[in-house]
Amino acid sequence: MHTLYRLGPLLIGLGCTPDKGSGADTGGEGASSIDVIGILITPDEVIVPVGTEVQLEAIGLSADRNSVDLTDAVEWYSGAPSVASDSNAQESEGLLNGMDGGVTTIVAVFDGIESAPARVTVTDAELSSLSISPPSVIVSAGESIQLTAEARFSDGASADASSQVRWITGDASVATLDGNGSLTGQESGATTVYVEWAGVSSDPIEVEVVGGSGSSGSVDLTIADVYATADEDTGFVSAWVDVENLGSGTAAAFWIDMWVDPSGTPGFGDWPDGYAECEYVGPGETTTVLVQAYAGDGSGTHDLFVVVDSTDDIEETSESNNTQWASTSSGGGGSGEPNLVIDFFGGYSDSDDGSSYYFVDVTNEATSDATGFYVDVYHDMTSAPIIGSTGDQYERISDLGAGQTEYLEFIVEDTCSYCESWTLLDSFDEVTESNESDNIESTDVELY
């Protein structure tokens, strides 16, 4: 997830990934052709094993949302060069080198404009697993979709590794990939994509390429729900926008705009207080995009106006359902039912200490809190656990607020060379949820 800081009226957008360009050394060519108002470093959070390198990129953004690659034009600065150094040398600008274990930040400066800092963790932990999102893709021939690879390490840390992994397609005649995970449909057919890094491979995702450009079916975007909060201490408003695609086609790379306390209904072309880019929504799918803006008055209550596909990039069967009014709450909660989901579940067995380690990320994707429930892990179990059964390890969560995530680690004093294990949320069915079907997941465990 990337965060964009712009100068002038403060504007922040999360979930956006500008075009990364070819990676050729251009000396910042094109920077003078747009009025750069902000700089984004991508990836903005990275974990680097000691002694390895990763290429960072600096993307300049203009007021009209055009972007330009500034990687060779900016000056790169590391907060702790002894932890991680970033090159300003010609032909290797932005090349980050993990020097020693620790955490630091990297900033890029161009024409007096400083980027938001990128957080860099240099680790000697082992890579545990890799995963790709979205978990499946339908794309038209000639259309491109940005995929993301997440790396999980043995100490429980995770980060975007899209520029560090090797992207592999099962059939390059159907779909091709660049080094950063941008997938382009070539011709009709089906294939798979997976990633490799440091001897670890992800599970493959399914990719379907259909017809010619624009022939992947109709698209109808709508806002299924908005949950928003206001931080009275910082003055920031955060809105989780559930974007649903009611059509049979795919929608990619479109903007979501948000206005805070507008005097009237904003019109086309009005500049928003916050925006974010939604990378992909498949047919019949819903994705959640976080948009943030600075309200500044310290109030906990604000009226919001949200627009999907605000710059009219997507041709839709209906344009009348792309807007929604919403309001913030300062304390969380709400009238809707909670919905517990598993954001991540993975694990490994350690041959040195004879234990198995599991990591479970639990998010409450709803407008009300979830109180009093168990999260269980079932080690080396071939069939799915049932409600009311107790896992090998478990933890009770007293309260998980709307939109919040709990990061859990479990240790089972047993190993397996290769086995299937499970996690179950709300294992004794104490929480009434809007969706009870997404509380269980399995993972394959290997011995290291």
Image (spheres, rainbow, N blue to C red):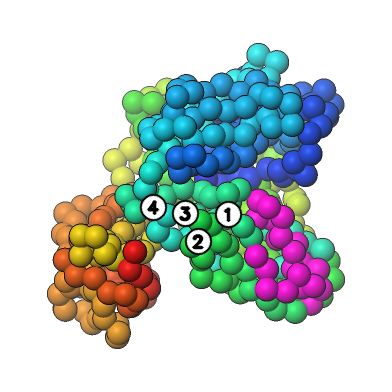
Q: Quadrant of residue 438?
A: bottom left
Residue 311 vs residue 114, the one in the foreground: 114
Tag 2 near tag 4, CB within 8 Å: no
The mark nearer the N terminus, 2 or 3, is 3
Q: CA distance from mark 1 to mark 3?
A: 9 Å
Asked if residue 318 can be seen in this view, the reply is: no
- Pick the quarter of the image with the C terminus: bottom left
- For the point 58% across and 49% down, the residue is 164
Q: Nearer the viewer, mark 1 or mark 4?
A: 4
At label 2, counting other C-alpha atoms closer than 10 Å, the crowd grade (few under 14, some 14-19, many 20 or more) is few
Q: CA distance from mark 2 to mark 1?
A: 10 Å
Q: Nearer the viewer, mark 2 or mark 3?
A: 2
At label 1, counting other C-alpha atoms closer than 10 Å, the crowd grade (few under 14, some 14-19, many 20 or more) is many
| Label disc, if present, on residue 165 of the rendered structure | 1
| Label disc, if present, on residue 151 of the rendered structure | 3
Q: Is 187 colored magenta in this rendering? A: yes
Q: Amino acid at mark 4?
A: Glu
Circle 2 residue: 199
Query: What segment carries the magenta color?
Result: 168-188
Q: Is 178 colored magenta in this rendering? A: yes
- For the point 59% across and 67% down, the residue is 194
